[in-house]
Image (tube, coloured by chain):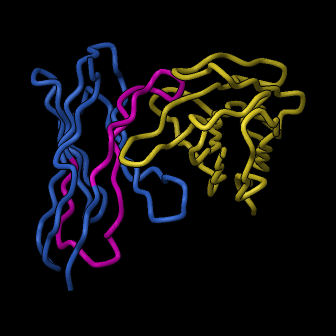
Amino acid sequence: NAGVTQTPKFRVLKTGQSMTLLCAQDMNHEYMYWYRQDPGMGLRLIHYSVGEGTTAKGEVPDGYNVSRLKKQNFLLGLESAAPSQTSVYFCASSDSTGSDEKLFFGSGTQLSVL
Amino acid sequence: QQQVKQSPQSLIVQKGGISIINCAYENTAFDYFPWYQQFPGKGPALLIAIRPDVSEKKEGRFTISFNKSAKQFSLHIMDSQPGDSATYFCAPGYAGKSTFGDGTTLTVKP
C-alpha cells in the first residue's frame, strides 16, 4: 500500500521556469491538500480539493495553480517560478473532514528556484 | 498577528523523562486539536488528536491535555525515548481551515 506518493522528490528550477508537482493517493480519499514548509516554520496550506473536479485556495495560493481531474491525483503547478517559492512541498489526503479526520502526508518534494 | 503559538521552540530531555509541548491559539472556532510528528526527510504524521468536549486523551505514552478557557492544549510524552526525537507540530482546526504552529524540535538524549 503506497499511500501518498509525490513526484519528483527533488527539483532545481531557474527563475521564470514552470513545473508541475504530482501527488497520487491510492486510498480513494476525497480530500487532498498541498502545503509548503519553510525552515523553522509550520506547514502553510497552498490549495486544497474536496473532491474530483474541485479546488479551493488556502492560506498562500499566489503563484500556484492546481488541478484535480482524477480523484486519485492532485497536481500543483508553478507557472513562473520565483526564488521565494524555494521550499519543501507536501501533499496530503484524507477520507473525511471533522473530528474523524486523519491526514496522510507524502514524503515531500524539495524545490530550489535559482 | 500569529494565530497559533507553539512553545518551546526546542526541547532536550533525558531518556525516561517527560516532554511537554504547549500550543496556544486565538481562534475560538477551532474544533479539532491534533499534534503531528515529523522525522527529518519525512512528511508529518498524525500522532494524537482531541475534540473540545474532552479535557484529556491518552494513547500509550502520549497524552493531550486541553484547556478550552485558556485556549491552550499540550502534548505530554511520558518515558521519552531517543526514537521520539523529532519535530512536533500543533495544528488546531480541520485541514483546510487549520493553522500549523512553527514546530518544536525534541531531542531525547540516551
Chain whose colour in the figure is yellow: A
Chain B colour as displayed:
blue
Residue interval drawn in magenta: B75-104
Q: Residue B39, image x and y in percent?
A: 45, 64
B23 relative to A96 in the view: left or right: left
Position of the N terminus of chain B by quadrant: top left
| Residue depicted at 26% across the width and 77% down the height | B81
Closer-to-camera residue (A74/A36)? A36
Closer-to-camera residue (A18/B43)? A18
Q: Quadrant of residue B7?
A: top left
Does B88 sit above or below residue A94? below
Q: Residue A13, image x and y in percent?
A: 74, 46
Closer-to-camera residue (A63/A55)? A63
| Residue depicted at 84% across the width and 20% down the height | A53
Classified by dominant secondary structure, the portion drawn in magenta counts as: loop
Does A102 sit above or below residue B61? above
| Residue depicted at 77% across the width and 32% down the height | A16
Residue B80 lies within the magenta run = yes
